Image: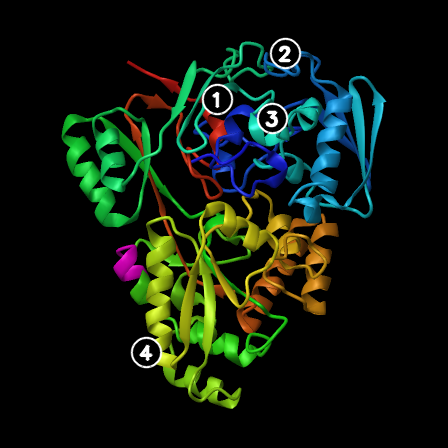
Amino acid sequence: MVPHWDPRLLASVANGVGFCYGGLLRFAIDRINVESRITPVPLPDAAESWKQLDDLTWEFKLNPNVYWHDRPPVNGRKVTAEDIKYGIEQLRDNSIHRGVFKIISEITIKDPSTITIKTSEPYAHMLKILAGALYVFTAPEMVKEPGGAKTWCVGYGPWKLVKWDPQGGYEMERHPRYHLKGHTGLQLPYMDRIEHFTFSDGATQIAAFVTRKVHNIVAFGADQTIAILDRCTPNGTCQGDIGTQTPAASARILMRLDKAPFNDVRVRRALSMGMDRQAILDTIYQGVGYPSQQVPFDAMGLKLPLLLDQRGPYHQFNPTEAKRLLAEAGYPDGFETTMVIGTSPGPGITIPETIQFQWKENLKVRVQFEPKESLAFSKTLFDKTYGAMIYAGSTINALDWDSHTYGMMHSKSGSNWAYVNDPEVDRLVEAQRTTFDPVKQRDIYWKIFDLDEKNIYRIDSVARYNLHLYDISLVNATGSNYTWFSDYAQRSLEAVWFKD
């Protein structure tokens, strides 16, 4: 379901913004740009080239052949420097991402094909921020339309929206004046049309993939993957790959750290140790997963996330020590609390239900759920209006390290939905922003990770490995550490094609 199209208010590209919108830069995750499968590399979009003028200033040369989609209110006009300036200002001033973009102090149009961006301090992540899958621009005229930018996707991305059911799917057609070409010099996108379907249940979705009515599916767990492969492998109609979960979808429990009982680190440690993560992994994901990790593992110089036995003592299942800590904190008989959860079927329900049971059995902590539909859930998260806890299976879909550290942890950040307020965390997440040396920056990320392990600012849940399956006719399709193929990597589909 696609509730609206306003990129300023979206924390996920699941609704198709990656297909139809564009930004200043972009990421492409495919089998050609193999380096981007570990850590995404910024590539041209509206800007065709760029350079750093000094520690605070970047200059971007704009592609002169970028055009909005041919529909009202822009009717296919050329994208201007004023449009780009407006788009960046909207992200900085009027979006849920303003905590990330507020470091931009000045945007100047030097001439019709050149803009400069100045930051308030040296910022090591500027290019990756500007290439983020969510950081895209709608046409300025859309704000004056009835209903504003929510009503339609008017962008300059590879496909233009032609049909949309707010309660269902959407259809898009190739943007004939798209401004980018592929690695062979051929015009992008290669595919003429995209149709996005909604399914009432997983069995229907699997059947559609096996019968080749849809061309990709993300399997949930080993059992489902095996079931799909058993049906499509004999016919030679499927292929696939496995990858880690995106940092955004490293599920976690956020707590009101500003009030009891969660302002006591002993309570947070006890809750973390009262969870049997291995049991959750074994039962819900058939062992194909790992404990969630909030600091991106590649920022720490790792190729894979840490496994459970490599994590700190408060991530290990230890109900005896957990009960001792709760008693020491004044809760020998546990306590009652609430947790906001989503309503979509799947791990977002079954995992918190399992945690609820484990806490009651192991710690006498009694959790009452507050289910909320998608829009209400997002509003509760972004407005930080949950009363005690919220199970955030997904947060901000960012492909940069800064959004997952400064953005999610600094006390003054607009996307610090977990109420983290620690001067040492603030110091470190500020330092990683201004540190250009990769070795020194990596050391800072380890220190942030260690603080999170020690103080349990968020309670890590578990993350599954992504099992991407594609129709055998798709070429150049892949996922990565930061993307689901058809979700966070939507823009990358511009370079995917069909073979006979």
The answer to whether 492 appears left or right of 196 in the picture is right
Which secondary structure class fits the magenta region best? helix
Amino acid type at image mark 1: Glu
Circle 3 SS class: loop
Q: Position of residue 37 (x, y in %)?
A: 47, 38
At 55% across and 73% down in the image, what residue appears? 454
Sequence-first disc among 3 and 2: 3
Q: Is residue 392 above or below residue 200?
A: below
Badge 2: residue crowd in 10 Å (few <14, some 14–19, many ≥20): some
Range of magenta residues: 281-286
Amino acid at pointer 3: Gly
> Mark 4 and 3 residues: CB-CB less than 8 Å, in contact?
no
Residue 494 got which mark? Answer: 1
What is the crowding at mark 1: few (fewer than 14 residues within 10 Å), some, or many (at least 20)?
many
Residue 463 lies, in percent from the top left, at 40, 55
> Which residue position holds label 2?
76
Residue for badge 4: 361
User: Callout 3: few (<14), some (14-19), or many (20+) C-alpha neighbours within 10 Å?
Assistant: many
Q: Left or right of 345: which side holds 131?
A: right
Residue highlighted by disc 3: 22
**In this rendering, would 231 be left or right of 97?**
left
Q: CA distance from mark 3 to mark 2?
A: 14 Å
Q: Nearer the viewer, mark 3 or mark 2?
A: 2
Mark earlier in primary sequence (1, 4):
4
